[in-house]
Image (cartoon, rainbow, N blue to C red):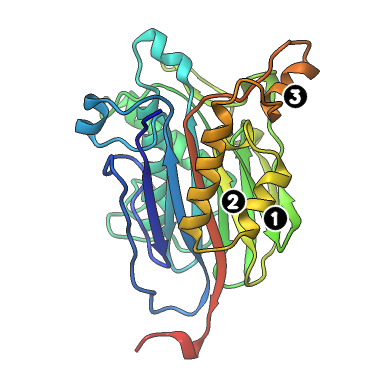
Amino acid sequence: MSMTIFQRLIFLRPIRYGGPALAAAFFYSSKPNNQTGWTLRCGAYCAPKGPLDAKREARLECCGEDSFAVVENQFQSVVAVADGVGGWRAKGVDPSKFSRSLMRHLEAIITGTSGWFRRGESPLAFISPTTLIRQAFWRLVGGYHSGKEQPFGSSTICVACLDRSSGTLETANLGDSGFLLLRGREVILQSRAQQHRFNAPYQLTLAPDGNVSDCSHMSAPHGCAVETGDILILATDGLWDNLFEEDVTRLVAMGGEPMEMAKRLALEARRMSEKDDYQSPFSVEATRNGLNRLGGKEDDITVVVAVPQYIGEASVEK
């Protein structure tokens, strides 16, 4: 099966949200910043479901209905993924617009270009992931009601924030996207899917009539201190529905740069999603819910791998 592939390596500096990008393979790297403290060295890889088509290529979309963000300021490094709910397509709504808009607003809050601050003013302190989700969502809702944008729809969201001073990682997850923090082969922290019922995840929703449902306070928060060499994986459900935890751990243990690990995970999940005789995590969960289903689950797959790193005085470029 032919497919659109997007890859990106992000190193230490704010990078724009994962919306429009090259449809072919794309590589990005940047120089280290001039601040001491904890940071995240990140790589992202997207493998949308379905074949490459001229329309998608022309519009330079890379992640299908998924999106992601990697951004940093003086207080925190932030990574996030969002998965637009595909059911809206039957109503004539492009689900990708909602997830991309959500990530764009999240990034704007961290960089100080959001309406939550005066123009050019940056946040004055660490912002928790739950607060980030709430602010990004309500900024999107505000844009809808003011007529500035029309991205109604739904999305799951997973956000991880690393405090650059203390090295504390805080996370919040709403729905069935999720994260896994590894220290070697040991799982230090992980999310659990939140669902109203099987295959019906919690999701931020803005309906055409302006009503909203599911809220940021429903997101599950977690936190712990990181160590150099830990590996954080954030991904949409396209990864978690097709790879078991031990598969993810094994693939990450093969090493490489963050982008290489993200690519390895995404492509293996893509491969397993196309198998009809595979007892996938999704089919296991379906069986638990009384459904007779075998095989992987074809879906957009977006993976962000982030490696915590401490930048000391001696490492800062003069």
The amino acid type found where label 3 is placed reads Val
Residue under numbered circle 2: 233
Q: Residues within 10 Å of mark 2 (few under 14, many from 20)?
A: many
Is residue 208 at all visible to an observer of this figure? no
Residue found at x 48% / y 56%: 260
Q: Is residue 157 above or below residue 264?
A: above
**Which residue: 38% across, 65% down?**
13
Q: At numbered mark 1, what does the secondary structure look like: helix, strand or loop?
A: strand
Q: How many marks?
A: 3
Label 3 crowd (10 A; few <14 / some 14-19 / many >=20): some
**In the depicted view, which residue is nearer to us: 184 or 160?**
184
Q: Could you tell me which quadrant the N terminus lies in?
A: top left
Which residue does the numbered mark 3 point to in the structure image? 284
Horizontal side of 120 relative to 125 (left or right) equals left
Q: Position of residue 291 (x, y in %)?
A: 73, 10
In three-dimensional space, the C-alpha distance between marks 2 and 1, rounded to whole angstroms, equals 15 Å
Of the residues shown, which amino acid type is indicated by label 2?
A: Ile
Instruction: Where is residue 113? Give x, y as percent.
Output: 31, 52
Q: Secondary structure at mark 2?
A: strand
Return the disc, 3 or 2, that comes first in the chain's sequence: 2
Q: Specify the quadrant of the image occupied by residue 231.
A: bottom right
- Above/below status of 274 relative to 35: above
Question: Distance from label 1 to label 3 (Cα)?
Answer: 29 Å
Q: Which mark is residue 236?
A: none
Q: Which mark is residue 223?
A: 1
